[in-house]
Image: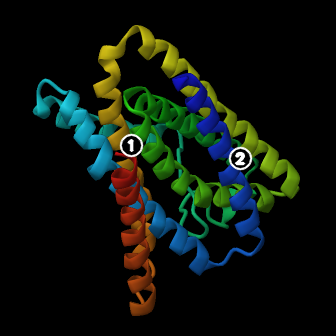
Amino acid sequence: MVLFWIIGTCLAGAFLSLLLAFLFFKKANVNIVTNMVSLSVGTMLGAVFLEILPHALDQATDSHDTMFIVLIGLLVFFSLEKLLIWRHCHGDHCETHSHDTQLKNNKSGSLVLIGDLSHNFIDGILIASAFIYEFELGLVTALAIYAHQIPQEMGNISIFVNKGLKKNKAILLNVIANITMTIGAVITYILIDSAGEILPVLLAFTASNLIYVAVSDLIPGLHKRTEIKESSMQIAMILIGVMIVYFFHTFLH
């Protein structure tokens, strides 16, 4: 039954994020993308500090070991981003995916696809780990990940289209990349089923992944828009994201 929920959540979430990304892409503007990114920050940090880390610490024999794993995880994801050119593009908040000479390089689209494949595979591992631990934690973790997936998919489609691909083909490439999420989730389910003691470690890595993406990739982009009205909207959307997670936490417990 758990495997059914894991696969169903990965497939449904991937389809929904691609659909919304496609719909928003047709009418996308800077304000919409910024609001979505702000909401993502709130849901990701809310999921970490209200759900994932508390559960990881509950399962740990030593809380210091758990926090050490979180720190190691931050370093691991930083290294992955450096080594795999793993970038999360959110509209115009993207250094590697900006509309400059790199987009004209035929290799740029391939690098984006490779990064997306790696990223989604890891997301599948995180979702499966959370579901195996607790159904409610799985839902909250998936919510946080997919809140980030929508602006990311918008960015990826934009990159492929600007590279010269037709929109339909760009969407197809994103669909292929999203399949790796389900693959990663299924592999994790099989491995954890025979080695459940690694689950607290995976929860700690889940926390470090979401913290890294929110703090390193998303928030710096938000700081580029400093107007009072836009900054106030960013803060409001972050709070809404946190409250959504808090609602799930209260309602599902």
Q: Which mark is residue 248?
A: none
Of residue 87 and residue 56, the one placed in the foreground of this image is 56
Mark 1 element type: helix
Task: Tell which residue pokes out farthest to the top in this image.
Answer: 194
Callout 1 amino acid: Asn
Say which quadrant the C terminus sits in: top left
Which residue is rendered at x = 33% and y = 54% of the image?
Answer: 250
Please tell me whether residue 235 is drawn above or below residue 2 in the rendered image.
Answer: below
Residue 232, image quadrant: bottom left
Of residue 160 and residue 172, the one placed in the foreground of this image is 172
Task: Tell which residue pokes out farthest to the bottom in this image.
Answer: 228
Callout 2 amino acid: Phe
Is 199 situated left or right of 140 in this image?
left
Please tell me whether residue 59 is drawn above or below residue 195 in the rendered image.
Answer: below
Please tell me whether residue 40 is drawn above or below residue 195 in the rendered image.
Answer: below
Say which quadrant the N terminus sits in: top right
Q: Nearer the viewer, mark 1 or mark 2?
A: 2
Which residue bears the numbered disc 2?
15
Is residue 158 visible in this depiction of the protein? no
Which residue bears the numbered disc 1?
209
Q: First in sequence: mark 1 or mark 2?
A: 2
Which residue is rendered at x = 45% and y = 81% of the image?
Answer: 225
Residue 161, image quadrant: bottom right
